[in-house]
Amino acid sequence: MAPRNVVLHVADVHKNFAGLRALSDIDLQVEEGTTHAIIGPNGAGKSTLLNVCIGRLAPDTGAVVFDGQVITGKQPYEINQMGVVRVFQTPEIFADLTLLQNVMVPAFSRRDGAFRLNAMQALSGRNDIRDEALYCLEDVGLAAQKDAIAASLSRGDKRRLELAMGLVQKPRLLLLDEPTAGMSRHDTNSTIDLLKKFKRRGMTKVIIEHDMHVVFSLADRITVLAQGRIIADGSPDEVKGNPTVQEAYLGGAHP
């Protein structure tokens, strides 16, 4: 099999907060078309790592390279415009808007060059953006509820809505922070099936997740963090059988 293109390279990244080490010697590569899971106990540095990747935090040393270009020092909106899209652990939706309007806002903002809360004012008559948003709602199974107010959704459907808001931005790299957190097992399995569909399309994803059923159902490669350091990196089978990982994190939780 031919080697895949490296889409994201986190190169020797360090990050401290008030003298406390959050990330140390982080070096990982995410290959195009793969699902790369980042796991570890609470406080391991997983969300800090994602925040460094999207420009919300600047590393003390090291660099983040996306598609061959150093993105360290760029603003979050600039990184987003390059195709790096993050879906957060707590759904960041517009509760008072309809589902369709929620997806139209980032669709318009992507074309406009920056995310704008007043985007709805410019959307009158934009059937092209409406159609694009509706397609993404269909993709996540929410088209029938397009006119519902977002606040009325279940937690699982709110996560699906935010995923549609991410998809409409046409990500080259989708970062998912605990996409099944707080879901029922039924909603979790539905989300797994949805993400598998995107995987078959060749979408590149980085997933932070505590549920090992989700991780081992989706991941092509797993990086394990503990106390801000990488303690293992490899295929699911390699990580599952790593005694250091089992002691630090997995225990008896993995299948």
Image (cartoon, rainbow, N blue to C red):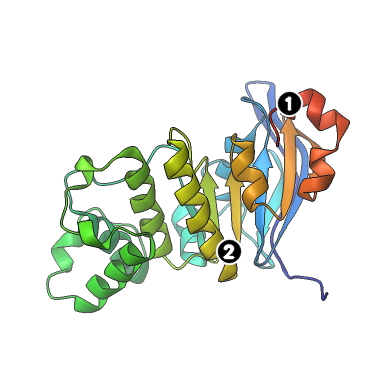
Instruction: Specify the label residue 83 is tagged with.
Output: none
Which circle's residue, 1 or 2, is located before the other in the chain?
2
Residue 186 lies in quadrant: top left
Circle nearer the viewer, 1 or 2: 1
Left or right of 208 in this view: 142: left
Residue on which the image places disc 2: 199
The residue that appears at 45% across and 50% down in the rendered structure is: 190
The x and y percentages for residue 17 are 62, 25
- Residue 80 location, x and y as percent? 47, 59
Looking at the rendered image, the quarter that the C terminus falls into is: top right
Q: Is residue 52 above or below residue 82?
A: above
- Identify the residue at horizontal 80%, vertical 41% (top origin): 239
Dot 2 falls on a residue whose secondary structure is helix
Q: Who is closer to the viewer here, 187 or 38?
A: 187
Residue 252's tag is 1
Q: Nearer the viewer, residue 162 or 52?
A: 162
Amino acid type assigned to the residue bearing label 1 in the image: Gly
